[in-house]
Image: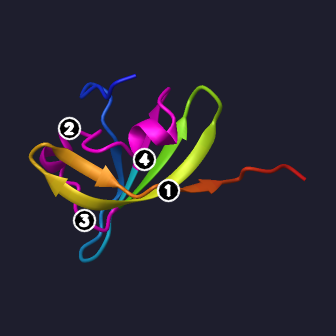
Amino acid sequence: MAYATTNPPALHSQAVSGASEWVYESADNAASVRAANYFTNAQDLGMKVGDTVRVRDTDDNAVTIHTVLTVASSGADLTDGLAVGTTNT
């Protein structure tokens, strides 16, 4: 699926200095979300390099945490991400 600006990431905590944290939920998996310029309006939203983005794939509830690598008028690039809570023992 493609990113829709009608479902933007939500600013979860805004830092006075340093990284802010964003939360994003959609049916797109982590591989889709970390694609170049996925968040096409990242600059308008106020995303900055070093911010973290917690992503939840609503299809399978998989959660990954990413760091913003670049932000430009064309969008933001994220790191590959770290899977969270992948096992249940």
Rendering quarter of residue 14: bottom left
Q: Is residue 31 magenta?
A: yes
| Secondary structure state at the residue bearing disc 2 | loop
CA–CA distance in space, label 3 to label 1: 15 Å
Callout 3 crowding tier (Cα within 10 Å): few <14, some 14–19, many ≥20: some
Callout 2 crowding tier (Cα within 10 Å): few <14, some 14–19, many ≥20: many
Q: Write the residue at 56% across / 29% down.
A: 58
Q: Is residue 35 magenta?
A: yes
| Secondary structure state at the residue bearing disc 3 | loop
Residue 21 drawn at (x, y percent): 38, 59
Task: Judge left or right: residue 25 versus residue 62.
Answer: left
CA–CA distance in space, label 4 to label 2: 16 Å
CA–CA distance in space, label 2 to label 3: 15 Å
Q: Write the residue at 35% across / 42% down.
A: 35
Foreground mark, 3 or 4, reads: 3
Q: What residue is shown with label 1?
A: 81
Labelled disc at residue 23: 4
CA–CA distance in space, label 3 to label 4: 15 Å
Rendering quarter of residue 68: bottom left
> What are the residue bounds of the magenta stretch?
23-51
| Secondary structure state at the residue bearing disc 1 | loop
Foreground mark, 1 or 4, reads: 1
Labelled disc at residue 49: 3
Q: What residue is shown with label 2?
A: 40
Q: Amino acid at mark 3?
A: Val
Task: Judge left or right: residue 46 versus residue 77.
Answer: left
Q: Amino acid at mark 2?
A: Thr
